[in-house]
Amino acid sequence: MKKKLVLIGNGMAGVNCIEQILKLVPNRYDITIFGSEPHPNYNRIMLSSVLAGDADMNDIVINSWDWYRENNIILHAGHTVSGIDTKRKIVSTESGIKVPYDDVIIATGSLPFMLPLPGADKKGVIAFRDIKDCETMMETAKTYKKAVVIGGGLLGLEAARGLLNLNMEVSVIHSNKILMNRQLDETAGLMLQKELQEQGMKFLLGKHTEKILGKERVTGLRFTDGSEESADLLVMAVGIKPNMAMAKKSGIEVNRGILVNDFMETNIPNVYSVGECVEHRGISYGLVAPLYEQAAVLAKKLAGLETDGYHGSVVSTKLKVSGVDVFSAGQYLDDVDTRAVRVQDEFGGVYKKVVIRGGKVVGSVLFGDISDGARLFSMIRSGEDVTGKEKEILLGSGGSAPSNADLIASMSDDEIVCGCNGVSKGAVVTAINEKGCASVNDIKACTKASASCGGCKPLIADVLTYVLGADGVKTVKEGICGCTTLSRDEVVDGIREMRLTTSKEVMHVLNWNNPEGCSKCRPALNYYLGMVWPEEHEDERASRFVNERNHANIQKDGTYSVVPRIYGGVTTPQDLKKIAEVAVKYEVPLVKITGGQRIDLLGVKKEDLPSMWTDLDMPSGYAYGKTLRTVKTCVGSTFCRFGTQDSMAMGIEMEKRFERLSTPAKFKMAVSGCPRNCAEATIKDFGVVAIDGGWEIHVGGNGGTKVRVTDLLVKVKTEEEVLEWTGAYMQYYRETGKYNERTAEWLERVGLDTIKAALEKKEDRLALVERIELALSLTQDPWKEIVETDKLRTTFENLPIPTMN
C-alpha cells in the first residue's frame, strides 16, 4: 500500500520537493496538493515579467495541469487549508474537503507585509505578491495615471518597472537613503538610482509614510515631514512575513516562522515544512535557492535516504531591472574587520567590490557586469583562502579579469546553478553523464535549467565544457522554431532560391518536422513570404495572431480596443467630434490617450468592430500589428520658441508614406523639432531630431522593458534625405530582421557598422527604397477592406466574444 502524502501549498518550494520525491521514489506515495490560488504551480519570480507585458500566465507556469495528471497527483486548486488534525492525521479545507495523511508538508509560503498605516484599507492600496496583484495593476493602469510604490528593495523596483511599462507615472518611496540597501552598498545603490531615474522612475528616499490620503480610494500619501505625494495606486512592497497562522492553529510550534530542525521536521511527528513559512536556526529565507536546498533535504528524508540535513544557506541576489544587472552575496558592507577590493568605471556603468575578512571572501557586490558572480559566490561558500592574491580576485595576475575555468570544479554537487527552477550542479552533471545531454538545450529539456529567465545559460555551458571538454559540447543550430532546424536566413534563402510562395510549400519543400507548422513559425513564414514576394504571396490570414486577424487589440475580457490613425498625433476638431460620437454610440467604456499621441477606444465588442470602423471612416492606427505603429511629434517650429524645424509636418509625411507596412516587429518613430527632444525620439526604433540646418537620424531605440537609447545613424540636410534614409533603413530591417525581433535587438545582432555600410551608397539606398515602395503600393487599409468585403465582414457577425486562455 502506498503512503498518503499531502502538500499544503502549491508554490515553488513545496512542489519542487514533490518533484524530487517522484524522482527518488516514484511509487512510494499517493500525493494530494492544496493550493489557495486557482492556478497550477508557477514561477513567482517572473511575476514582474507578467506585469511588464513580457510574459503571460502560460509563460511562467512551472508544472502544467497535465503534469499533475501524468503523476497521478490530486490537485485542489483554489482551496485554502483551514487546519490539520495532527492526532487523527486529517487535513481540512475551508470548503469542507477532508484528506487523511501519513506525512504532510506545510509549504504555505509568505504573506506580503502591509504597513499598518491609517487608510491602508482604501481601494487602490495593494501588495505585489501574486497573479491577482498583477491583474489589479494592469486594470488600474487603464483608468488611472499615477502610481506610488512603497519599498525600494528588489520587489518594489520590479513593481515600479512594470508600472512604468503600463504607462503610469511612478514614484518609489524608500525609508533608507540607498536603494536595495539590504543587497547593495552606497556606491552600487547610487549607480542603480541614477540608471533607473534615466528610465523614468522618481525616487523619494529617506521618507516615512504617516497616512494614506483619500476617501474611499487612495489619492495620495502624507509623510512624517509634512510633505505629500499624489497617488491613484499604492503598491506596498516592504517585505514578507511567514504564512504560519494555520500551522499555529493546528498546534505546530512557531516563532517568527514554523520552527523546523535540520531535517525540516516540526515538533509534531510526520509534519514537515519547507519554504518561506519556515524558521530554521533563527532564519527565514525569502530567496528561492535556499528553499530548494531545503526541499532537497526533505525529499531525501521522505524517500528514506541518508542526508546530512539542512545547515542554512549563504544567499545571493541577482536583479535585472530594464537591462540593469546587479549581483550581491554574503556580507557586502565594510566593517572594522574587513578590507575590500573595488573596481569602478562610471563611464561604462560598472562597479565591482569584493569584501575580505581573515583572508577569505565573505561578500561581493557587482553592478553592470555580473559575469564574476557565480565564481565569487563559490569562493564565499567554499571559504577558500585568498591571502596574498586579493587583487587577483577581480584584476587577475596580469591585470585582466580571471577566467571561470576552476569555478565548476570548486562547486559542490548540491549547489544550485539554476535558481528559478532549483537545478543543482549535480543534476546537470547527471543529465550529461546518464542521459547523454550535450548542449544547453538538451539540459533545458531534461532538467528545466535555463528554462525560465535564462540567466544561468553561461554557467550551464561551463558545466557542459567541464564534463565533456570543449570538443564534446554539441553546437546546436537554433531553428526558427521546433518544427525545423533551419535558421531565419536559411528559410528566407530557400524561399528566394526555390521561389516558394505559400507556407505549405515552404514546410513541404524545406522538410518541416511538423507538416502543419506551429504558432511560432506560421506567422513568421507568412511575414517572410510577404516580404520576399509582395506581389505573388497572398496574405495567410489564418496564420496571423488574433490581434492581426481581427485588426484590433484583444483585451483580457475578450473585448477589443480600436485606435484610429492620427497622423503625427495631429488631428482636427471634426475628427475629434467623430470619434466622440462613435464612442457614445457604441457605449465605449473607456477612452484613453495613448503614449503615442493617439486615442484608444477600449471595450468594443467584436461584432461591433466593422460598424464602428464604418462610422469612424478613418484609417486603422495599426496599434495591434507588427508594422509602423506611430510617429510621435512635438509642435516644432510651428509653435515652439525652441523649434528649429517643422517636426509635425515631417512626422505626418513619414507616417503617411510608411503606414500599413509589415515589419518583423512593431516599429515606432518620433520626430523632435529641436535637440530638447520632447518627442522622445532617442528611445524609438527610428528617431529624427531637428538641428540647425538639418536633421539627425537615430536608430535602434526601445522604451519598453529593456530600455535602449538610440545610436546616431547619420546627419542630413533636407527633408527628402530624411525620407530616403527612412525608407532604406526600414527595408533593410525588413529584409534582414528575424520575425518578432525589435530593431534594438536587431541592431545589436547585426551591428551598427554593418547597417551604415549597407546604406552608405546612394544607389544602394535607392534600390532599398524602390523595394519598399513596391511593398507599400500593394497595401490597403484593413478596416476599409473588411467593411467593403462581405466575406470578411461576416467573420465578425453573431459570434461569441472569445475568452483569453
Image (cartoon, rainbow, N blue to C red):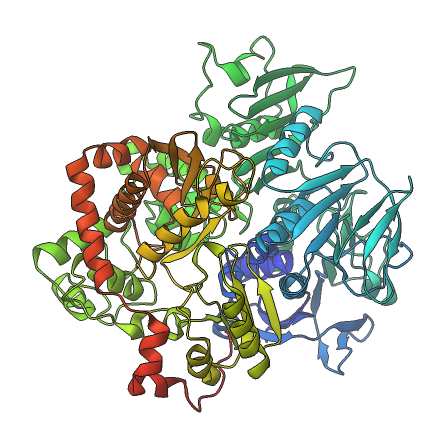
- Residue 388: image quadrant is top right
Q: Tell me residue 805's x, y (percent).
A: 50, 74
Who is closer to the viewer here, 589 or 507?
A: 589
Q: Is residue 425 visible?
A: no
Observer able to see residue 88: yes
Is residue 207 left or right of 457 when viewed as pictured? right
Place of residue 106 in the rendered image (x, y in percent of width and height, measured from the top left): 72, 62
Image point (34%, 67%), residue name = 519
Q: Quadrant of residue 189?
A: top right
Find the residue positioned furthest to the bottom.
798
Total labels: the figure holds 0
Residue at x-position 30% and y-position 45%:
723
Nearest the eye: 208 or 29:
208
Q: What residue lies at 85% left-to-right and 67% top-to-bottom?
A: 216
- x and y percent of residue 461 in the render? 39, 38
Q: Is residue 593 above or below residue 377?
A: below
Height in image: 300 above or below 504? above
* Left or right of 9 on screen, residue 351: left
142 or 631, nearer to the observer: 631
Q: Quadrant of the N terminus?
A: bottom right
> Residue pushed farthest left?
498
Residue 490: x, y in percent?
A: 18, 51
